[in-house]
């Protein structure tokens, strides 16, 4: 299965064109939006504009800069993956939106214990985890602040060993961590960055 992923769009108008173009070029089976789709809820019609342009199966989680009300919008579009487990192309995909608490009081922050309780009931070994926040210790370094990822997500990864973790949130920490659990943060789509993940006998991830 091939996944095209985008994270941290923040209402970017250029991403509305770049994502459909990348879908045409790379022919993914699934488009996955990993949070911060809007910029604090603006523009209000952005999610509808985005997903109506997507002509393949699509799923999404909100980010910490999205208002929790975006979950209802994603539900209405039939793409909501937040705190859900969905089968696509024979693969199980589990989603987490929002983020662990930040110093900035952003609109959608979730205490670590709630993240753990929400995921532990739906996660399974070998699934694909689509999480806006990265796991603590991986793809989560902010200069001057150190590691800021989610400890609950890290615990989920250690406990269930997913095939892949597709994340975002930390704009400065784009990269790929290869291994038995492949992790990717492609960097913000608002700056033109997307990720491509091929899942077969092994997981191959690259940043576009």
Image (spheres, helix red, strand yellow):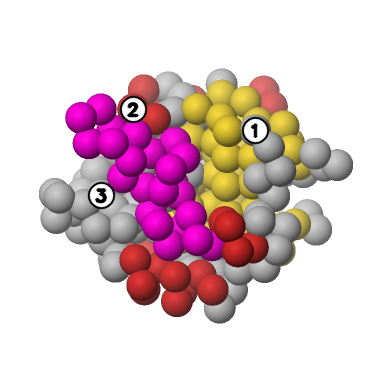
Q: Foreground residue, 174 or 34?
A: 174
CB within 8 Å, label 2 to label 1: no
Label 1 sits on residue: 178
Which badge, 2 or 3, is on the more N-terminal residue?
A: 3
Q: Nearer the viewer, residue 148 or 185?
A: 148
Q: Is residue 175 above or below residue 146?
A: above
Q: How many marks?
A: 3
67 relative to 48 in the view: left or right? left
Residue 188 occupies quadrant = top left
Magenta region: 133-156
Instruction: Check disc 2: other Cα within 10 Å, few if <14, some if 14-19, many if 20+.
Output: some
Q: Gap in Å between the C-alphas at discs 1 and 3?
A: 28 Å
The residue where tag 2 is placed is: 172
Residue 74 appears anywhere in the view: no
Q: Which residue is mark 3?
A: 65
x and y percentages locating residue 9 in the rendered image? 36, 37
Residue 139 lies in the magenta stretch: yes
Q: Are marks 2 and 3 in contact (CB under 8 Å)?
A: no
Q: Quadrant of residue 112?
A: bottom left
Residue density around tag 3, few if under 14, some if 14–19, many if 20 or more, within 10 Å: many
């Amino acid at each position: 299965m091939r996944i095209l992923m985008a994270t941290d769009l923040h209402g970017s108008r250029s991403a509305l064109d770049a994502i459909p173009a990348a879908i045409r070029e790379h022919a993914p089976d699934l488009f996955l939006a990993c949070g911060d789709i809007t910029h604090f809820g603006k523009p209000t019609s952005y999610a509808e504009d985005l997903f109506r342009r997507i002509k393949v199966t699509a799923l999404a989680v909100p980010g910490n800069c999205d208002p929790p009300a975006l979950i209802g919008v994603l539900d209405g579009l039939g793409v909501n993956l937040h705190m859900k487990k969905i089968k696509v192309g024979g693969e199980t995909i589990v989603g987490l939106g929002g983020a662990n608490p930040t110093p900035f009081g952003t609109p959608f922050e979730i205490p670590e214990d709630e993240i753990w309780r929400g995921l532990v009931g739906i996660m399974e070994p070998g699934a694909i985890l689509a999480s806006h926040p990265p796991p603590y210790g991986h793809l989560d370094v902010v200069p001057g602040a150190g590691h800021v990822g989610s400890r609950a997500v890290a615990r989920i990864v250690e406990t269930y060993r997913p095939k892949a973790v597709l994340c975002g949130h930390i704009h400065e920490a784009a990269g790929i961590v290869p291994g038995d659990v492949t992790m990717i943060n492609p960097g913000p789509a608002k700056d033109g960055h997307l990720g491509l993940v091929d899942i077969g006998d092994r997981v191959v991830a690259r940043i576009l």
